[in-house]
Image (cartoon, helix red, strand yellow):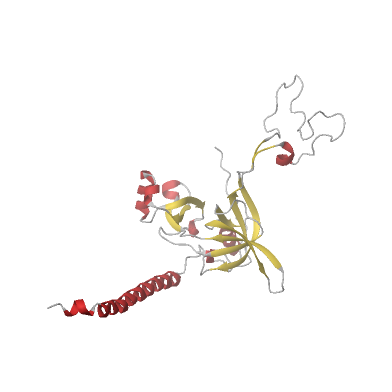
Amino acid sequence: MIRRPPRSTQGVSSAASDVYKRQIMRCGLIARKLGMSRIFSDNGEHVPVTVLRIEDVEVLSVKSIAKDGYTSVQLGFSNKKPKNISKPLRGFFAKAKTEPKEKVVEFRVSEDAILNVGDKLGVNHFVTGQKVDVIGVSQGKGFSGAMKRHNFGGMQASHGVSISHRSHGSTGNSQDPGRTWKGKKMAGQYGNVRITTQNLKVVKLLEDDDLILIQGSVPGSKNGVVLLRDAIKHKMPNEAPFPAGFRNDSKSNKDDLSLSSDKNEKLSDTTCVLPEKLKASGSSSSSLP
C-alpha cells in the first residue's frame, strides 16, 4: 500500500505550522444524535439545529510512533453492561481500567496532541461558531429504483412505453465489451452508507447537559452514533482548547454531591418516620421489659 507523504511545512513560520498541525491533527469526539429542534438567535432568526449528546467519552488507549509507527488516540463512548461484552473486549477495557464501552473509535493525532489514558472529554472540546465535520451512517431506505436512488428522469409517460415508465433503461453494450460495466447506476439498496457532512456550524454548547447543538442536519437516524472532528476546510479557532477539551471536574463533583444529598435526605426521611411508627405502636413497646 502506497502512503501519501505528509505535507511539507518548509518555508512556513513556526506559528503557522503550529496552527496547521492543530487544525488537522486534533482528536475528535463521539456523540449520540437525539433528534432535531430549533433555537432563535439574538436578532430573532430561526435556526434549525441537531441535538448531539456526549456520553462518557474517555481515552482508552494511545498509539505512538515508537511502538505502532503512528500516533493516534482511541476513545470509548457510552458505558455498557459487562455481560454484553465479549471476553477479548473485557480484557481490553480491564487494561484501560475503565468500564466497558458501547463504541470504540480511533482518531489520528499529531505528536503534540496525544492524550493520557483515562482522560474524559467534554462538549468544551469545541467552541461556539466553530466549523466541524460530522461522520455518520445514513438512514437506510431499502431496495429502491433508479429514479429514487439516482434521481433519473424515467422513461416517457405517454405512448410507446410498455409498463416501463420508471425503468432505468438500457444497461448493457454491444458485442464489445459484451457486459455491463461495474458501477453502473441501477436499482439497489439506497442509504445505509457512511457519509461525511462538512462545514457544519456549532451553534450552542450546553455543558451542564453534555449537549452540542449543530446547525442543520446530521447523517444518521435518531439515537445513532456520529463522529465529530475539526473541519478540514476551515481554520480552527484560536479559542479551541489544545490538545483537547476535558470534562469539567466540578460538574462531576456537583453530581456526586447532589447524589449524596439525595441519599441523606432519604435517610433523614426514614429516621423521621421511624419514631412516629414507634409512637403509633406504643402499647407494644411499653410491654417490653
Q: Position of residue 244 (x, y in %)?
A: 50, 63
* Relative to 289, residue 84 above or below: above
| Camera-side residue of 37 and 178 | 37
Q: Position of residue 54 (x, y in %)?
A: 51, 60
Q: On the rendered image, what quadrant is the C terminus found in? A: bottom left
Q: Position of residue 109 (x, y in %)?
A: 51, 54
Looking at the image, which residue sits at the far front?
A: 283
Looking at the image, which residue sits at the far right?
A: 159
Q: Residue at x 86, y 28 (%)?
A: 160
Is 139 positioned to the left or the right of 64 in the image?
Answer: right
Is 97 positioned to the left or the right of 168 in the image?
Answer: left
| Camera-side residue of 257 and 249 | 257
* Relative to 128, residue 87 above or below: above
Looking at the image, which residue sits at the far top?
A: 175
Q: On the rendered image, what quadrant is the N terminus found in? A: top right
Residue 287: quadrant of the picture: bottom left
Q: Is residue 162 in view?
A: yes
Q: Position of residue 79 (x, y in %)?
A: 43, 56
Q: How many marks?
A: 0
* Relative to 248, residue 234 above or below: above
Is 210 positioned to the left or the right of 147 in the image?
Answer: left
Q: Residue at x 74, y 21 (%)?
A: 176
| Camera-side residue of 40 and 253 | 40
Residue 37: quadrant of the picture: bottom right
| Camera-side residue of 162 and 225 | 162
* Relative to 4, residue 33 above or below: below
Q: Residue at x 58, y 54 (%)?
A: 222
Q: Is residue 63 in view?
A: no
